[in-house]
Amino acid sequence: TDLGIQETLKTLGIEAVNRGASTGGYWFNTRGAQIDSVSPVDGKIIASVSSATETEYEAIVLKAQEAYHYWRMVPAPKRGEVVRQLAEKIREKKQALGELVSYEMGKSLQEGLGEVQEMIDICDFAVGLSRQLYGLTMHSERAGHRMYEQYHPLGIVGIISAFNFPVAVWNWNTALAWVCGDVCIWKPSEKTPLTAIACQKLTQEVFEANGVPEGVSCLLIGDAEIGKLMSNDTRIPLISATGSTRMGKLVGEAVGKRLGRHLLELGGNNAVIITESADLKIVVPGAVFGAVGTAGQRCTSTRRLIIHESVYDKVRDAVVNAYGQLKIGNPLDQNNHVGPLIDKDAVKAYQNALIQVVEEGGKILVEGGVLSGEGYESGCYVKPAIAEAQNTFKIVQHETFAPVLYLMKYSGGVENAIAVQNGVPQGLSSAIMTNNLREAEAFLSQAGSDCGIANVNIGTSGAEIGGAFGGEKETGGGRESGSDAWKVYMRRQTNTINYTDSLPLAQGIKFDL
Ligand code: NAD
């Protein structure tokens, strides 16, 4: 209800018109273009934000630089303690933040809460990590010498994020960056400014209570222009950017030109291979959730099913049948499976994809369409669709950020399916459904899936924070979240110490004076 959302906004400190730039403690009186946050759930304006201008940008970078000089000297476990308290704060506000994610972005409430849980999980991970920022010790080839490596903070981390994971991606980056001793400047998607303001406010409370200075957590609301300033700024050693491949190429080029470091998390074109021995009990829910969850707006959404000819008809019929049972509607109502797309541009891209696949020779198996009438006033609700297609179709090679699933048949061995799976420009997530050990291992081998994520008997979406997350090829090559992804937020230094009174040179070189 409206009243419920008003309560949620109040709990999170969101006002009718919000300021769009903050250093943590201070909120600038921003005068940039007004951004209205429109909910795709009901088409209503939730609240507005005045976006940041170059003036605030400059002030924030200076503040962040200053804060870095302090923050890098705070012992890492103490930085971890602040992140631990942030996780506590997020736990306290989980329900409200999950609701706002769902209402502002349009994913289901369960997924909104799940996204907030990922924030909590990555904070917990980072707390442990704050005592484990290990370097190695090597044996020197020179007598009386000791050699080791250590990791130092980098400086300012610039975070550019996409609309579809409006809060988790920020925290995947910040939780690690902060324990590593970096300070962060965040430019969220202009489509989801309110969840970003909520995160900044939660952080501010925790940071202020701990005496963390302004500048360690900074927020700049704005469009691509702010992102461009960040990408070109030599004062920002690392840009972590999540979004479309189109954006990633521009950011990668700008950062590359100044030889900065980037972490790119871009589009996917994820497939599930279904072999002869696949267990249909898990294939159908895995494929359907992967394709329609978040209305197909996950970077890891399932876009293609590559099905062995011997089971093709059976799998096709089961999946088509499951689509018939999907309930589309308000994502805050837990009876619904599929919520809205983010906006009308996304609806257009979805419609175009369905036209194009037919033009290229595909066959529609489950009709799409835009829903109208009661409950669908926002114009953003669409029917998940399925088409039979060839992998070589232009539209299949392209990531359409909507619930459109392409079915294709393969014959012969699993290597043929792997070739199809790899035969797209993107390389994020992939899965195989099989009970055949040889097929599973071939899929995971160096001649198997070329993606950053390769799963057996689970779908393509829904990664855990403990693993490194990211993909190859046009997905950008970056890794964030778990495993040793923290290393990208630090600079590595190799140190050699001579504790003798002579100076032997490496490689046995003589230099007599
Ligand atoms: P988008 O590329 O339109 O925007 C992403 C962000 O980049 C926004 O904050 C935007 O303002 C900014 N931006 C746009 N152009 C820019 C430029 N030239 N310079 C600097 N910043 C710029 O993406 P979107 O529609 O918000 O998100 C959907 C896309 O994100 C999909 O392609 C999806 O696959 C991808 N995604 C990838 C991952 C991943 O981890 N690989 C995760 C989530 C989303």
Image (cartoon, rainbow, N blue to C red):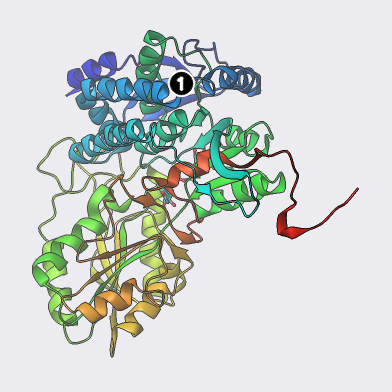
Q: Is residue 16 above or below residue 369?
A: above
Q: Residue tagged by mark 1?
A: 49
Front residue of this view, candidates 68 and 509:
509
Q: Position of residue 434 (x, y in %)?
A: 19, 75
Please tell me which residue is depicted at 45% across the width and 28% down the height of the picture: 178
Q: Position of residue 363 (x, y in %)?
A: 29, 76
Left-right relation of 508 to 483: right
* Residue at disc 1, CB closer than 8 Å to ligand 1: no
Furthest-bottom residue in this view: 412
Left-right relation of 260 to 432: right
Left-right relation of 490 to 208: right
Furthest-front residue in this view: 501
On the question of residue 42 being in view, the answer is no
When asked about the image quadrant of residue 120, the answer is top left
Kind of residue sitting beneath label 1: Val
Front residue of this view, candidates 295 and 277:
277
Structural crowding at the residue carrying mark 1, measured as other residues with C-alpha within 10 Å and reported as few (<14), some (14–19) or many (≥20)? many
- Looking at the rendered structure, the secondary structure element under dot 1 is strand
How many discs appear?
1
Q: Is residue 360 above or below residue 89?
A: below
On the question of residue 73 being in view, the answer is yes
Q: Is residue 445 above or below residue 3?
A: below
When asked about the image quadrant of residue 283, the answer is bottom left
Q: Position of residue 440 (x, y in %)?
A: 25, 75
When asked about the image quadrant of residue 13, the answer is top left
Q: Position of residue 441 (x, y in %)?
A: 28, 75
Q: Is residue 317 above or below residue 460?
A: below
Quadrant location of the N terminus? top left
Please tell me which residue is depicted at 59% across the width and 30% down the height of the picture: 155
